[in-house]
Amino acid sequence: MRHRLIASLTLFALSVAVSGAPARAADVTFGETTSFQSDSTCAYVRTPDQIVFQFLCTGFETQVENGKIAGAAARRIGERAKPSAAATPPIGTRVFSAVVPVTGGSPVYVPIHLSGLAITGVGANAAVLLRVNGEDKIFSFPPKTDESFVRTFVYKAEAASELRMTLFILAEQDSKEADNSAFISLNAVDAGKADPNQGKPGPVSAK
């Protein structure tokens, strides 16, 4: 796990160096560790220059299932345990929260990039909600989605001493539809100066 975190963050830092992101983002530095995490689902790591951090998540996923999505999702997430093919409740949710210390930056400018996988049937949908210091951003995935995604929210403030972050994922189904399965996972959260994947989907799974 540690080697995976270091390798992933090294690649991220290299992309930052060539990104041409706003110079003012470099004024913000992040803590060596989080001051709070709700659990260990997502592991925090920071670059040596302190201007980029990343959460790598393992098993941060939810689904609503009637037996039609499990195979497709299992092929995409690879090494992790396969999603269950058994029927599930009509709404599935997961939540993760953390507080990242912030120093400097006036104003504060922090692009935050979410990488994951969403698969939805005709009668289902999914969503990711990101909350940062009281600001909310919802990314929705409508019926018939099949996407390894990267979504970005830029947090801006005059000043901040911390980033209070909550991630909420949701899958839900319409019981009247036959094809009503959905699966959504969040695999990485990258924050700092640049898009870690240059607009391309991030890794589908993380150990």
Image (cartoon, rainbow, N blue to C red):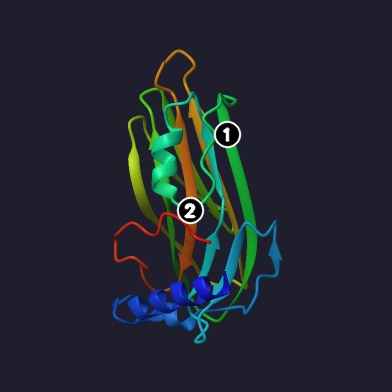
Farthest residue toward the top? 176
Q: Position of residue 41 (x, y in %)?
A: 62, 56
Q: Secondary structure at mark 1?
A: strand
- Residue 23, above or below 161: below
Task: Tell me which label, 1 or 2, sits earlier in the chain.
Answer: 2
Dot label at residue 79: 2
Q: Position of residue 112 (x, y in %)?
A: 45, 63
Dot label at residue 92: 1
Picture residue at 43% right of the left edge, 79% below the top: 10
Q: Secondary structure at mark 2?
A: loop
- Residue 163, above or below 2: above
Picture residue at 46% right of the left edge, 37% below the top: 183
Picture residue at 50% right of the left edge, 71% below the top: 4
- The one nearer the camera, 66 or 94, is 66
Q: Residues within 10 Å of mark 2 (few under 14, many from 20)?
A: few
Q: Position of residue 48 (x, y in %)?
A: 52, 86
Q: Position of residue 192 (x, y in %)?
A: 45, 72
